[in-house]
Amino acid sequence: MEHERHRWLDQTFGAVCRTTRCDAARRRTLEEIVNLAVELAREGREGRKIGTLFVIGDVDAVLDQSRPLLLDPLYGHQSDLLRVERPEFRETVKELAQLDGAFILRDDGTFVSAGRFVDVDVAAPENFLPGLGTRHAAGASVSRTTGAIAVVVSQSSVVRVFAGGDLRAEIIPELFLLSRERLFTRGAEVTEMPEAGVTLAVAGD
């Protein structure tokens, strides 16, 4: 079972981590954030769908390319309380996700700031993907101009991962969770699409 879990994690996160040269700490944080993003995409908050943006790593550069939209709700709190793996803090993040702006995290999974407006390089048309809005443009842009990875929760309940300015993963929450729990029927898998650098959870035959 543990071997199957490691295989699944590599299928799901391996391509993203290899292309961005993730170390072990960043990979663990990416896994935690994607799982949190999937929960947000499925659950919403107070009966409505919400979208948000998580930016992982290269914190100083990301802060330089963003600005606060409101008084930072995370300011002044002890860093050990702001860890993504803390269940009680994950619930706080879900509440704060209802506010506008992005979350900024260190590679080790410590949240640094919330409610940040990420500047978008409007001179780069590749930041704007057909059918996707400004939150995705911000994720693409900040991942292109810094060494960070961006995880976007769409209000259409899809989670997308950007690295190096490119879309690296597109995750359908229901299929992702079924795959994680090994509840697919025989032949189901997480299929990697190397030509696009994208991993997508799909049901097998």
Image (spheres, rainbow, N blue to C red):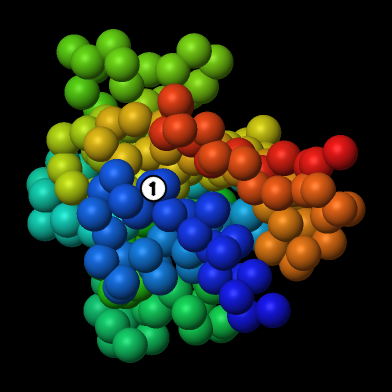
Q: Quarter of the image containing the N terminus?
A: bottom right
Q: Position of residue 50 (x, y in %)?
A: 62, 44
Q: Quadrant of residue 197?
A: top left
The image shows residue 48 at horizontal and vertical percentages of 74, 45
Q: Nearer the viewer, residue 201 or 150?
A: 201
Seen at 44% across and 42% down, the residue is 161
The correct choice, above or below, for 4 with respect to 30 in the image is below
Q: Residue at x 64, y 47 (%)?
A: 190
Q: Is residue 66 left or right of residue 39?
A: left
Q: The disc labelled 1 sits on which kind of residue?
A: Val
- Relative to 129, is 16 above or below? below
SS at mark 1 in the image:
helix
Q: Nearer the viewer, residue 55 or 17?
A: 17
Answer left or right for 147 relative to 92: left
Is residue 53 at least partly visible in the picture?
no
Where does the C terminus fall, quadrant-wise?
top right
Q: Is residue 24 left or right of residue 158?
A: left
Q: Residue at x 41, y 47 (%)?
A: 15
> Which is more toward the observer, 98 or 157?
157
Looking at the picture, how far across and down is residue 179, in whole percent? 72, 57
Q: Which residue is mark 1?
A: 16
Q: Measured from the top left, where is residue 180 in percent x and y?
A: 69, 63
Depth check, front residue: 185 or 164: 185
Asked whether residue 120 is in view, the answer is yes
- What residue is shown at x 50% (from left), y 83% (from top)? 86
Q: How many marks?
A: 1
Q: How many residues crowd around disc 1 within 10 Å: few (fewer than 14), some, or many (20 or more)?
A: many
- The answer to whether residue 87 is above or below residue 196 is below
In this view, 144 is above or below 128: below
